[in-house]
Image (cartoon, helix red, strand yellow):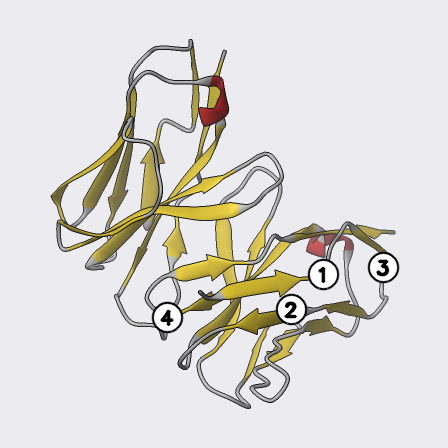
Amino acid sequence: GNSVTQMEGPVTLSEEAFLTINCTYTATGYPSLFWYVQYPGEGLQLLLKATKADDKGSNKGFEATYRKETTSFHLEKGSVQVSDSAVYFCALQDEKLTFGTGTRLTIIP
Amino acid sequence: DTAVSQTPKYLVTQMGNDKSIKCEQNLGHDTMYWYKQDSKKFLKIMFSYNNKELIINETVPNRFSPKSPDKAHLNLHINSLELGDSAVYFCASSQGTILYGYTFGSGTRLTVV
Protein backbone atom coordinates (compact mmCIF):
# COMPACT_ATOMS: atom_id res chain seq x y z
CA GLY A 1 0.00 0.00 0.00
CA ASN A 2 0.90 3.66 -0.13
CA SER A 3 3.04 5.15 2.61
CA VAL A 4 4.84 8.34 3.57
CA THR A 5 8.05 8.52 5.59
CA GLN A 6 9.14 11.81 7.00
CA MET A 7 11.98 13.04 9.11
CA GLU A 8 11.70 12.28 12.80
CA GLY A 9 11.47 15.27 15.04
CA PRO A 10 11.53 17.31 16.97
CA VAL A 11 13.54 19.86 15.02
CA THR A 12 14.76 23.00 16.79
CA LEU A 13 16.28 25.88 14.83
CA SER A 14 17.23 29.46 15.47
CA GLU A 15 15.32 32.24 13.77
CA GLU A 16 16.52 32.93 10.20
CA ALA A 17 18.05 29.45 9.85
CA PHE A 18 17.52 27.30 6.74
CA LEU A 19 14.94 24.56 7.10
CA THR A 20 14.69 21.17 5.42
CA ILE A 21 12.20 18.50 6.44
CA ASN A 22 12.68 15.30 4.47
CA CYS A 23 9.77 13.34 3.06
CA THR A 24 9.80 10.23 0.88
CA TYR A 25 6.87 8.21 -0.34
CA THR A 26 5.89 4.82 -1.71
CA ALA A 27 2.98 4.73 -4.10
CA THR A 28 1.54 2.94 -7.07
CA GLY A 29 0.19 5.23 -9.74
CA TYR A 30 0.59 8.99 -9.77
CA PRO A 31 -0.45 10.55 -6.49
CA SER A 32 -0.59 14.21 -5.60
CA LEU A 33 1.72 15.32 -2.80
CA PHE A 34 1.02 17.81 -0.03
CA TRP A 35 2.47 19.48 3.00
CA TYR A 36 0.05 20.34 5.79
CA VAL A 37 0.81 22.42 8.89
CA GLN A 38 -0.80 22.15 12.32
CA TYR A 39 -0.31 25.09 14.68
CA PRO A 40 -0.77 24.40 18.41
CA GLY A 41 -4.39 23.65 19.29
CA GLU A 42 -5.59 23.98 15.70
CA GLY A 43 -6.60 21.80 12.80
CA LEU A 44 -4.57 21.03 9.70
CA GLN A 45 -4.02 23.68 7.06
CA LEU A 46 -2.86 22.99 3.54
CA LEU A 47 0.57 24.60 3.15
CA LEU A 48 1.47 23.62 -0.41
CA LYS A 49 0.92 20.94 -3.02
CA ALA A 50 2.28 19.42 -6.21
CA THR A 51 0.20 17.26 -8.51
CA LYS A 52 2.76 15.84 -10.94
CA ALA A 53 6.45 15.07 -11.28
CA ASP A 54 8.80 18.09 -11.27
CA ASP A 55 6.05 20.41 -10.04
CA LYS A 56 7.16 22.83 -7.33
CA GLY A 57 4.65 23.85 -4.68
CA SER A 58 5.26 27.07 -2.76
CA ASN A 59 3.54 29.17 -0.13
CA LYS A 60 4.61 31.57 2.65
CA GLY A 61 8.29 31.12 1.74
CA PHE A 62 8.08 27.31 1.90
CA GLU A 63 8.85 25.20 -1.16
CA ALA A 64 8.81 21.52 -2.10
CA THR A 65 9.48 19.80 -5.44
CA TYR A 66 7.82 16.54 -6.53
CA ARG A 67 10.76 14.28 -7.42
CA LYS A 68 9.59 11.05 -9.00
CA GLU A 69 13.10 9.66 -9.52
CA THR A 70 13.87 9.85 -5.79
CA THR A 71 10.21 9.55 -4.63
CA SER A 72 10.72 12.61 -2.47
CA PHE A 73 8.93 15.84 -1.58
CA HIS A 74 11.25 17.62 0.85
CA LEU A 75 10.03 20.83 2.49
CA GLU A 76 12.42 23.82 2.53
CA LYS A 77 12.41 27.40 3.73
CA GLY A 78 15.32 29.79 3.45
CA SER A 79 14.79 31.77 6.64
CA VAL A 80 12.44 30.52 9.34
CA GLN A 81 10.54 32.68 11.83
CA VAL A 82 9.27 32.00 15.33
CA SER A 83 5.75 31.95 13.88
CA ASP A 84 6.69 28.87 11.79
CA SER A 85 6.77 26.73 14.95
CA ALA A 86 4.22 23.97 14.32
CA VAL A 87 3.89 20.32 13.34
CA TYR A 88 4.40 19.66 9.62
CA PHE A 89 2.85 16.68 7.82
CA CYS A 90 3.80 15.31 4.45
CA ALA A 91 0.94 13.51 2.68
CA LEU A 92 0.10 11.77 -0.55
CA GLN A 93 -3.29 11.39 -2.14
CA ASP A 94 -4.67 8.89 -4.54
CA GLU A 95 -7.99 7.37 -3.40
CA LYS A 96 -7.39 8.80 0.09
CA LEU A 97 -5.02 11.14 1.85
CA THR A 98 -2.22 9.27 3.66
CA PHE A 99 -0.06 11.17 6.13
CA GLY A 100 3.47 10.84 7.39
CA THR A 101 4.05 10.81 11.13
CA GLY A 102 4.56 14.58 11.41
CA THR A 103 7.63 16.63 12.33
CA ARG A 104 7.46 19.08 15.21
CA LEU A 105 9.39 22.26 14.43
CA THR A 106 10.36 24.77 17.08
CA ILE A 107 12.02 28.06 16.15
CA ILE A 108 13.83 29.93 18.91
CA PRO A 109 14.48 33.69 18.76
CA ASP B 1 -17.94 31.57 7.68
CA THR B 2 -16.17 28.38 8.79
CA ALA B 3 -15.69 25.98 5.87
CA VAL B 4 -15.65 22.75 7.91
CA SER B 5 -17.06 23.02 11.41
CA GLN B 6 -17.10 20.39 14.11
CA THR B 7 -18.92 20.29 17.41
CA PRO B 8 -18.11 19.99 20.19
CA LYS B 9 -14.51 21.20 20.32
CA TYR B 10 -13.88 19.37 23.60
CA LEU B 11 -15.63 16.31 24.97
CA VAL B 12 -14.87 14.70 28.33
CA THR B 13 -16.86 11.61 29.19
CA GLN B 14 -16.75 8.45 31.25
CA MET B 15 -15.95 4.98 30.01
CA GLY B 16 -18.97 3.10 28.73
CA ASN B 17 -20.88 6.21 27.62
CA ASP B 18 -22.14 6.86 24.09
CA LYS B 19 -21.28 10.16 22.39
CA SER B 20 -21.59 11.87 19.03
CA ILE B 21 -19.47 14.39 17.15
CA LYS B 22 -21.04 16.48 14.42
CA CYS B 23 -19.46 17.87 11.27
CA GLU B 24 -20.77 20.24 8.64
CA GLN B 25 -19.14 21.69 5.54
CA ASN B 26 -20.35 24.63 3.47
CA LEU B 27 -17.91 24.19 0.59
CA GLY B 28 -20.24 22.18 -1.65
CA HIS B 29 -17.83 19.23 -1.54
CA ASP B 30 -19.14 15.75 -2.33
CA THR B 31 -16.75 13.79 -0.11
CA MET B 32 -16.28 13.90 3.66
CA TYR B 33 -13.92 12.07 6.01
CA TRP B 34 -13.17 11.28 9.63
CA TYR B 35 -9.56 11.06 10.80
CA LYS B 36 -8.22 10.14 14.22
CA GLN B 37 -5.08 11.80 15.60
CA ASP B 38 -3.45 9.98 18.49
CA SER B 39 -1.28 11.41 21.26
CA LYS B 40 1.83 11.14 19.07
CA LYS B 41 0.13 13.25 16.38
CA PHE B 42 -0.26 10.29 14.00
CA LEU B 43 -3.23 10.78 11.66
CA LYS B 44 -5.22 7.83 10.40
CA ILE B 45 -8.29 7.81 8.20
CA MET B 46 -11.35 6.13 9.67
CA PHE B 47 -14.18 6.66 7.21
CA SER B 48 -15.04 8.41 3.98
CA TYR B 49 -18.43 9.23 2.50
CA ASN B 50 -19.14 10.37 -1.02
CA ASN B 51 -22.54 11.99 -1.49
CA LYS B 52 -23.95 10.13 1.55
CA GLU B 53 -22.49 6.77 0.51
CA LEU B 54 -19.77 5.03 2.55
CA ILE B 55 -16.69 4.51 0.36
CA ILE B 56 -13.85 3.98 2.83
CA ASN B 57 -14.18 2.04 6.05
CA GLU B 58 -10.78 1.35 7.57
CA THR B 59 -10.25 -1.15 10.34
CA VAL B 60 -12.24 0.61 13.02
CA PRO B 61 -14.14 -1.04 15.90
CA ASN B 62 -17.87 -1.51 15.30
CA ARG B 63 -18.48 0.85 18.21
CA PHE B 64 -17.76 3.68 15.76
CA SER B 65 -20.60 4.42 13.37
CA PRO B 66 -20.60 7.29 10.88
CA LYS B 67 -23.83 8.75 9.58
CA SER B 68 -24.30 11.13 6.67
CA PRO B 69 -27.82 12.59 6.49
CA ASP B 70 -26.84 14.69 3.46
CA LYS B 71 -23.64 15.49 1.62
CA ALA B 72 -22.91 18.53 3.79
CA HIS B 73 -22.98 16.60 7.07
CA LEU B 74 -21.04 13.67 8.46
CA ASN B 75 -21.52 12.70 12.08
CA LEU B 76 -19.59 10.18 14.15
CA HIS B 77 -21.30 8.19 16.87
CA ILE B 78 -19.25 6.20 19.34
CA ASN B 79 -20.77 3.55 21.60
CA SER B 80 -19.35 2.15 24.83
CA LEU B 81 -16.41 4.52 24.96
CA GLU B 82 -13.05 3.12 26.05
CA LEU B 83 -9.93 4.83 27.41
CA GLY B 84 -8.12 4.11 24.14
CA ASP B 85 -10.66 6.20 22.22
CA SER B 86 -9.14 9.34 23.71
CA ALA B 87 -7.76 11.29 20.76
CA VAL B 88 -8.44 14.27 18.54
CA TYR B 89 -10.96 13.53 15.80
CA PHE B 90 -10.84 15.59 12.62
CA CYS B 91 -13.51 15.93 10.01
CA ALA B 92 -12.47 16.88 6.47
CA SER B 93 -14.02 17.39 3.06
CA SER B 94 -12.79 17.40 -0.51
CA GLN B 95 -13.92 17.91 -4.06
CA GLY B 96 -13.25 14.25 -4.76
CA THR B 97 -10.24 14.70 -7.03
CA ILE B 98 -6.58 14.33 -6.11
CA LEU B 99 -5.74 17.83 -7.22
CA TYR B 100 -6.86 19.94 -4.28
CA GLY B 101 -6.27 18.11 -1.01
CA TYR B 102 -8.69 18.14 1.88
CA THR B 103 -10.09 20.95 4.02
CA PHE B 104 -10.02 20.05 7.70
CA GLY B 105 -12.13 21.12 10.64
CA SER B 106 -10.47 22.32 13.83
CA GLY B 107 -10.88 18.99 15.59
CA THR B 108 -12.72 17.51 18.56
CA ARG B 109 -10.57 16.53 21.52
CA LEU B 110 -12.20 13.50 23.12
CA THR B 111 -11.04 12.49 26.60
CA VAL B 112 -12.41 9.30 28.13
CA VAL B 113 -11.96 9.01 31.88
Q: Do pointers 3 and 2 mark residues of a single chain?
A: yes
Q: Amino acid at mark 1?
A: Met
In the image, A90 versus A38, the foreground residue is A90
In the image, B70 versus B25, the foreground residue is B70
Decide if residue B70 is on the left or right side of residue A36: left
State the CA–CA distance, disc 4 to disc 3.
Answer: 36 Å
State the CA–CA distance, disc 2 to disc 4.
Answer: 17 Å
Q: Amino acid at mark 2?
A: Cys
In the image, A81 versus B20, the foreground residue is B20
Q: Which residue is mark 2?
A: A23
Q: Do pointers 4 and 1 mark residues of a single chain?
A: yes
Q: Secondary structure at mark 3?
A: loop
x 33%, y 32%: residue: B61
Mark closer to the observer (4, 3): 4
x 50%, y 73%: residue: A49
How far across and down, in percent of the image, does residue A53 sit? 51, 88
Q: Which residue is mark 1?
A: A7
